[in-house]
Amino acid sequence: MSESDSPSQPSVVEPAAPRAWVRWVRRLLLAISVIPFAILLGFAGLVLPSVWDDQRLDAVVAWVALDWRDRGLDAAKTRLQFELDHQGIGAQVADSSCTFTEKDGFRIVHCAWTTMVVIPFAERSFPLSFQSHAEVAPDGDLR
């Protein structure tokens, strides 16, 4: 048997180590893909709390409209104050941000509020405005 036919020495080809510029390009591509993702996450962290507050306020406005239908205007206003404080959205939404209107038999509860979103390190801010609306028809259905 010759040396090349020896079973004790398998012929394994080791991959060549990547060149330095290949490693540099890989790191650059990784950074290019991670930086926009991090910026998007940061922006979402600034905006999402207000969006969640608006979603909770949509439900609160519906509950308040049903309370107005079932228990009267004073009970609805009391429920609004309680829910704004209890849900943790009272800091951005004042009681005066919500209106109670009765028109053509419809009982309408409407809340509109604006918050300023501050972008850290950029010394910039921009307003975000939200509205929640619920109405009870003369037949008692919530719309």
Image (cartoon, helix red, strand yellow):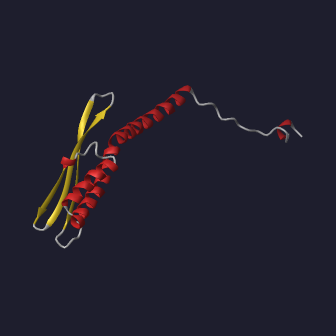
Q: Farthest residue toward the right?
A: 1
**The N terminus - image quarter:** top right
- Residue at (21%, 71%) from the top-left corner? 140
| Front-lying residue, 135 or 17 | 135
Q: Position of residue 80 (x, y in %)?
A: 25, 54
- Residue 119 in which image quadrant: top left
| Front-lying residue, 97 or 129 | 97
Query: Above or below — where is 77 with respect to 118?
Result: below
Q: Farthest residue toward the left?
A: 104
Query: Above or below — where is 102 with respect to 85?
Result: below
Q: Position of residue 89 (x, y in %)?
A: 30, 47
Q: Answer yes or no: is residue 133 visible.
A: no
Q: Position of residue 123 (x, y in %)?
A: 28, 28
Q: Farthest residue toward the bottom?
A: 139
Q: In the rendered picture of this protein, how many numbered marks are placed on residues?
A: 0
- Residue at (53%, 30%) from the top-left corner? 22
**The C terminus - image quarter:** bottom left
| Front-lying residue, 10 or 116 | 116
Q: Farthest residue toward the top?
A: 20
Q: Answer yes or no: is residue 32 visible.
A: yes
Asked whether, in this view, residue 61 is left or right of residue 43, the answer is left
- Residue 100 in which image quadrant: bottom left
Query: Above or below — where is 29 with respect to 102?
Result: above
- Residue 91 in which image quadrant: top left
Asked whether, in this view, residue 79 is left or right of residue 101, the answer is right
